[in-house]
Image (spheres, helix red, strand yellow):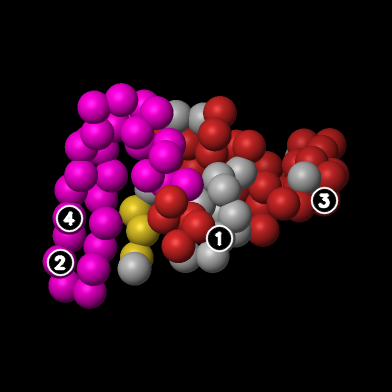
Amino acid sequence: MGSRGQIISLQDENLCIVFNTDSDVRKFRELINTVKGRRANSVFSQRTEESSANQYFQFYGYLSQQQNMMQDFVRTSTYQKAIHSNINDFHVRSQSIFFL
């Protein structure tokens, strides 16, 4: 899809919208967030490519990686502190697929 595409799911139909500029994409997403009564994207979403985030979460989705992380107290407590310090970024995780 790329960074200028947007998929919207409406019940049993999917719409694909492709924009000419990144600015148009941002304006569209802000409009959708306003209409849905949601906050704008988190800092994480604004500064991270979607494909990069997907790879990151897919890697840590494997059970062996989860076990390894949970046994690493320093890493786990660091993540916990970061989450508690930036609670607004983790309250509602935005996605590029909107369900209207």
Which badge, 3 or 1, is on the more N-terminal residue?
1
Instruction: Determine whether label 2 and label 4 are within 8 Å by CB.
Output: yes
In the image, the segment drawn in magenta is 1-30
In three-dimensional space, the C-alpha distance between marks 1 and 4, rounded to whole angstroms, equals 21 Å
Q: Is residue 78 magenta?
A: no
Report which residue position mark 1 lands on.
38
Query: Which marked residue is nearer to the observer: mark 1 or mark 2?
Result: 1
Measuring 24% from the left and 34% from the top, which residue is drawn there? 19
Which dot, 3 or 4, sits closer to the camera? 4
The N terminus - image quarter: top left
Q: Nearer the viewer, residue 66 or 43?
A: 43
x then y, percent, for residue 77: 83, 44
Residue corresponding to mark 2: 13
Residue under the point 42% across and 40% down? 27
Which numbered disc flags the more N-terminal residue, 1 or 4? Answer: 4
SS category of the residue bearing label 1: loop
